[in-house]
Amino acid sequence: MWKGRLAIIALLAVSLLSGLSMLTVGGASDDQLEVYSWWTGPGEEEGLAAMAEAFEAANPGIRFVNAAVSGGAGSNAKAILASRLLANDPPDSYQRHAGLELLDDVRSGKVRDLTELYEQQGWRKVFPKGLLDNLTIDGKIYAVPVNIHRANLIWFNPRTLRELGLPGPPKTWSDFLAQAATIQAKGKVPIAVGPEWTQKHLLETVLLGELGADSYERLFSGDLRWTSPEVTAALDTFGKVLAVSDVKSAAGEWQPQLDRVVEGSAVYAVMGDWSSSYLEQAKKLQWRDGYDVATSPGTQGVYDFLSDSFTLPSGARSPDLSRKWLIECGSAAGQNLFNPLKGSIPARTDAEAGLYRGYLGWTLQQWRDPKTRIVGSLTHGVVANNAYNAEIDSALGLFVQHGDLGKFAGTVQQQFEETR
Ligand code: GAL
């Protein structure tokens, strides 16, 4: 109850502040660029800060205004952005994921067609076709991808595994559940989770691991029902995984979720590879030594991808300036500056592989391997539109309370049909 009220008060305050800034700033837009994202805090903000600096250096006299709103996976930023767009107060560029997340903005005319910019910059040749398809609606391209992130990863501290005598990270979810019994007997939490979106991220990887890539895709295209025996079995596994997590006491964001793994009170965490940036830069840990990572159980050879992209909003105050930012996002120099700091790999296919070391080198090789099976993330906007994703959020929030799988599956199936 209080949480809800606080969220509403915070939302009103931010809307008011953005309204005020519009009053004071409105019109004087040629000397500043307002970029909207949710990249704040350690592991999130470093890449953006480097791009901001490069932008200001390349555009003397223009101030980069960082309008980031905290909350992992855009959990707060997306709601506040929606109110700004509704009030026709767009930033000069905003973050969206490639995929169905972009669709509403295109359909409601909130973003401008970037096809010409793509032609001019030769970008059709440098981004992978599958990614371009996820940015194209009715033949027009609407956003510029700055990176590729991976969602299907399980993070751990190798020292904890050694101390517990565990042979290595689990290869399947049933392997994980077997390990969980040993881990609990030794007084530790088998898997750490954070806020609701991290639980959905976990759900996505359990579904992928249990169903396999084909059925995962069929689930989100509507060819496989949430209430089918196959999905029911996968959801049952998810329920068991959640039951050995710290969901009851989980608080804070994805960084504290990983902190528990680093400190050793929890053994595993499923999270995207922005974690590598946090673990290396904020926690000063080295891949394979202070921390380690494997593909999440059951997903070997699969790359559950997402891509952070930037848009040119309709009604942006200075579209030429916004385009300069987009050009930086799409350029090889911009991508190579941003990605090693962000813990992601470049969206461009021609970026220099040598810059990506440690974990990033490992994952880049898999991304580029033609044998790797690529699927899109649920939590991070690729395979579900915003309305459907929001309905899954509500149903999942309730499921965590009541634990009724049938009810959860039935609601999500119905919402799929209603929001498509
Ligand atoms: C994702 C986003 C990533 C990272 C993560 C955690 O949605 O694409 O870049 O920021 O959320 O906030």
Image (cartoon, rainbow, N blue to C red):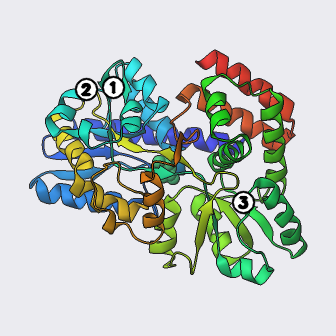
Residue position marked by numbered label 1 in the rendering: 88
Kindly identify the amino acid type of the residue bearing the numbered disc 1: Asn
Secondary structure at numbered mark 2: loop
Q: Residue at x 27, y 48 (%)?
A: 329
Which residue is more in the foreground, 61 or 117?
Answer: 117
Kindly identify the amino acid type of the residue bearing the numbered disc 2: Gly
Residue 71 in view, yes or no: no
Instruction: Return the disc, 3 or 2, that comes first in the chain's sequence.
Output: 3
Instruction: Return the disc, 3 or 1, that comes first in the chain's sequence.
Output: 1
Q: Is residue 218 above or below residue 126?
A: above
Which residue is more in the foreground, 258 or 56?
Answer: 258
Residue position marked by numbered label 2 in the rendering: 315
Kindly identify the amino acid type of the residue bearing the numbered disc 3: Lys
Q: Quadrant of the N terminus?
A: top right
Mark identifier at residue 171: 3
Q: Are marks 3 and 1 in contact (CB under 8 Å)?
A: no
Secondary structure at numbered mark 1: loop
Residue 362 appears at what percent x and percent y? 47, 65
Which residue is more in the foreground, 316 or 166?
Answer: 166
Q: Quadrant of residue 118?
A: top left
CA–CA distance between discs 2 and 1? Answer: 7 Å
Q: Residue at x 57, y 26 (%)?
A: 387
Q: Are marks 2 and 1 in contact (CB under 8 Å)?
A: yes
